[in-house]
Image (cartoon, grey):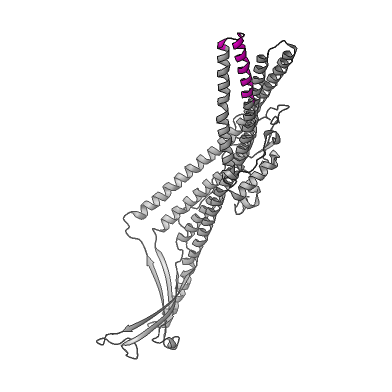
Amino acid sequence: MNEHPLRIKLRAAAILAGLLPLLLAGCAVGPNFKRPAPPPVSGYTAEPLFPTASTQGVTAGTAQQFAVGRKVAGAWWTLFRSRPLDRLINLAIAHNSDLKAAQAALRVAEETERAQRGAFFPSAALGFSASRNLGSALLAPVPASNALLYNLFTPQVTVSYTPDVFGLNRRTAESLAAQTQSARFEMIATYNTLVGNVVVNAIQLAALDAEINATHKLVAMNTRMVNILKYQYAKGYASGVDYAAQKSQLAEVAAMLPPLQKQRTQLRDLLAVLIGRFPAQEPKYGITLSSLALPGSVPLSLPSQLVRQRPDIRQAEANLHAASAQIGVAIANMLPNIELTATAGNSAIGFNKLFTPGTDFWDLGAALTAPIFQGGTLLHQERAARAAYREATAQYRSTVLTAFQNVADTLAALQQDAEGLRAAAAAQSAARTTFRLVSRQEKDGYANTLALLNAEQAYQQAQINLVQAEANRFADTSALFQALGGGWWNRTAMSKDSHDH
């Protein structure tokens, strides 16, 4: 007994209705991303860390202790207690062009990610066509009125939907979301680099100002010594060799000034650009080493925290995630694709007859396409995606190792900076004592002016060495905050949508 056609249609519709949720749910092919585990290490250096040496009586002589596990402040530069430095950094954050470009690149990535979300929904398009037609008299006329010359007006709506059966859209969206995170952490890295550059260059500029001031004094002293020896040589009290040697010494000291002044000008120009200004618009910086305070307690994040804090590591992790999702995209492109379409509209030979009975039309359709032969293109694209994932894995590991190296190097530098400052301070103190003693002897007639000038020159040179040692401590303290990630997660504007902080 044959089954009624209506029952057959109803049964087919029920089967399709049952299959539709499966088509919509589907499965996402390719590997599911797993975040890399923290490095299996408990410290940064092979030797245990101890507080740095202290030096009394100098600006950067504070002993520094490392507070393991303590949070890095979001505005860590304020620990230097310099309002001019704070103003510079605020100007840089507000006006730096590189930071603004990185923020715009993040916005591009965010909007691209949002655009991909549309693939999860049906798309609808409204169309309207109007035409003037002349039919052939040898053929049956198209209109029911048998007119050969007629107008045709057709408004219609087309709806199409591609079920994400194998997860092509999901993996694509996953990859774009990871790329957005990569752009976010690249922007944060730009922010950290900007702040670090402002701090370090401001410290170097303050040190250069002090060095140039001391070098001017050295030039003045050597000029006096040359004049004294010139007079003595003319009177026969000094040899020509002594006079020539002193002139050579003056030339050497004077030759130190142009490179220092050149470097100072370049640093001032660089700082102006960092805060978004032209070199001719540079502000008055007003930063001196003596106006800075060295933090006595500095944070030291745990190794497991470092991989969550460093923006370069987070960016490498996001790139790894994107590469993982691209494997799924490549596999899904090798599998069948289903497209559902529906069109409904109206067609009439007169505009005033649109939407009248008998002018409606509609159609439903489903299409399945599957790649059969692509000349190896899809296969090699999948292999390329897997190779890109291995590349991203190696790059992630390299980034982590470099980050740990940065922290270890900076910790070692802080220890050595403290010892170097102690030695420089001792040398400066000894040179100052010698200068005072020779000055007293010169007043009492036991030492000549040349001996006094030599002692003062040694003192000024020791002062230059001390300035450099102080600048090293400030700069490397700044480098430690940078190496630990810069504290961005404690600044609301930076930590937005970072998922971890």
Residue at 58% x, 35% y is: 264
Q: Is residue 449 above or below residue 99?
A: above
Residue at 45% x, 86% y is: 355
**Does residue 1 appear left or right of residue 283 in this picture?**
left
Q: Is residue 156 above or below residue 174?
A: below
The answer to which quarter of the image holds residue 329 is bottom left
Q: Main secondary structure of the magenta part?
A: helix
Is residue 139 highlighted in magenta? Answer: no
Relative image position of residue 18 (x, y in whole percent): 48, 71
Highlighted range, magenta? 217-241
Residue at 49% x, 59% y is: 170
Observer-nearest of 233 and 281: 233
Relative image position of residue 429 (x, y in whole percent): 70, 21
Q: Is residue 452 above or below residue 271?
A: above
Which residue is the extreme one toward the top? 236
Which residue is the extreme one toward the left? 138
Observer-nearest of 68 and 64: 64
**Does residue 119 appear left or right of residue 70 in this picture?**
left
Observer-nearest of 100 and 407: 100
Relative image position of residue 272 (x, y in whole percent): 59, 43
**Is residue 87 among the parts visible in the rendering?**
yes
Residue at 47% x, 42% y is: 394
Q: Quarter holding the N terminus?
A: bottom left
The answer to which quarter of the image holds residue 158 is bottom left
